Image (cartoon, grey):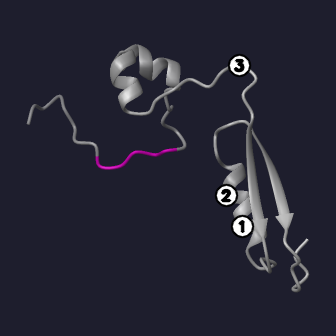
Amino acid sequence: MSEHCEPVTHVDAEQTPVPDARQLTQWLGEPLARRLGVYALPDGFLLSVVIPVYNERETVREIVRRVRETPVPLEIILVDDGSTDGTR
């Protein structure tokens, strides 16, 4: 191993910038980016996430938290299907 190259043993995800789809497409080329499922979101894109909940009182907050972490513009729609445990 060259003295100028240090092996990467840890990458801090919070400090490592993540390229967006347009950058990846530019680097990889359009055909490869499409094969890998890399697509730029159109301007104004909004993903609607419908989450059916039935007696999910203990888990619904965690589920919503995880969905909100998704780096995509989205709206969350919770549909309670007659829960009897107080899910709201």
**Element at badge 2?**
helix
Start-end of magenta stretch? 9-13
Q: Are marks 3 and 1 in contact (CB under 8 Å)?
A: no
For the point 75% across and 60% down, the residue is 51
* Residue 61 x/y as whole percent: 78, 67
Badge number at residue 41: none
Considering depth in this image, is 27 or 56 the residue closer to the camera? Answer: 56
Q: Earlier in the sequence, mark 3 or mark 2?
A: 3
Residue placed under numbered mark 2 in the picture: 66
**Element at badge 1?**
helix
Considering depth in this image, is 86 or 27 the residue closer to the camera? Answer: 86
Spatial CA span between label 1 and label 2: 6 Å
Main SS, magenta region, reads: loop
Q: Measured along the vertical axis of the image, is residue 38 above or below residue 7? A: above
Q: Quadrant of residue 65?
A: bottom right
On screen, residue 30 versus residue 19, left or right, reads left
Spatial CA span between label 3 and label 1: 29 Å
Considering depth in this image, is 83 or 23 the residue closer to the camera? Answer: 83
* Residue 54 x/y as whole percent: 79, 76
The N terminus: image quadrant = top left
For the point 72% across and 67% down, the residue is 62
Q: Measured along the vertical axis of the image, is residue 69 above or below residue 46? A: below
Residue placed under numbered mark 1 in the picture: 62
Crowding around mark 3 (Cα neighbors within 10 Å: few <14, some 14 to 19, many 20+) is: few
Residue placed under numbered mark 3 in the picture: 43
Spatial CA span between label 3 and label 2: 24 Å
Q: Are marks 1 and 2 in contact (CB under 8 Å)?
A: yes
Q: Earlier in the sequence, mark 3 or mark 1?
A: 3
Q: Measured along the vertical axis of the image, is residue 86 above or below residue 44? A: below
